[in-house]
Amino acid sequence: MIKKFLKPLLITLGLAVFTSSALAAPVKSVATVDMKKLFDEYHLTKGAQGKVKENQAEIAKENNEKLAEIRDIAKKIEDLSKLIDDGSIAPKLKEQHVRDRTLQANKGNALENNRREWLNRRNKAINENIVTEMRKILAQIQDKVEAYARDNDVDMIFDKSARGTTQTHFLIFSKDQYDITGSLLETLNKAAAPKGE
């Protein structure tokens, strides 16, 4: 789910993660970075993905509870329909069963409409939360990339994972020696709790 929202944000950052303000000056140092890899392997991304899964599981549980209530009503309607179709039943009792069935049908329809509206609201909220969290994470990553450029006197850093509208890479080729992704990943994940904690 997170990946669905990641693509447009990475494309926005994709042309150049960091560009020197002095474009007229000669470019002395250039580097590349895989922003997608930084995002995917950043420990905060994994934590955010875990929260999304927890929220989705909670929504699924609540949705199943609501569906169970609706199924119970459907069973009552079915039972009442059988009683109504029974030729041996007294007319007054039959009328009562018809009224009860109508009430149950109205109740079931209302519950189903409420369930759908609730599900749409919850899904919309979770999607908005995902986008907000992703933007925060991408901003943190971009800050680290820019800090690396300043600290290492790098004039330009290009995102080698960026793709254009035709799905071709913006950066066609670069030597591995210019790739700073590994170094940045170490910096980003320094604050991560050791595995097993």
Image (cartoon, rainbow, N blue to C red):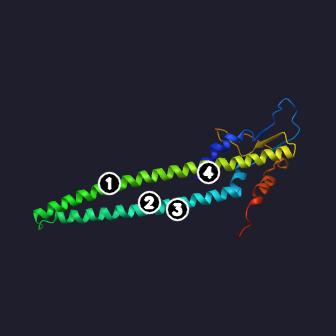
Dot 2 or dot 3: first in sequence order is 3
Q: Looking at the picture, how far across and down is residue 45, in whole percent? A: 67, 55
Q: Which mark is residue 57?
A: 3
- Compared with residue 197, is residue 43 higher up or lower down, i.e. above or below? above
Query: Callout 2, which amino acid?
Result: Asn
Q: How many marks?
A: 4
Q: Looking at the picture, how far across and down is residue 150, in whole percent? A: 84, 43
3 or 4: mark nearer the eye: 3
Q: Label 2 to label 3, Cα distance in Å?
A: 10 Å
- Please tell me how crowded label 4 is: few (under 14), some (14-19), or many (20+) other residues with Cα within 10 Å: few
Q: In this view, which residue lies farthest toward the top?
A: 24
Q: Label 4 to label 2, Cα distance in Å?
A: 24 Å
What residue sits right under mark 2 in the picture? Answer: 63
Element at badge 1? helix
Q: Nearer the viewer, residue 135 or 75?
A: 135
Dot 4 or dot 2: first in sequence order is 4
Q: Which mark is residue 109?
A: 1
What residue sits right under mark 4 in the picture? Answer: 3
Q: Looking at the picture, how far across and down is residue 83, in whole percent? A: 19, 66
Dot 3 or dot 1: first in sequence order is 3
Q: Label 3 to label 4, Cα distance in Å?
A: 18 Å
The answer to whether the residue labelled 2 contacts the one labelled 3, judged by CB atoms less than 8 Å apart, is no
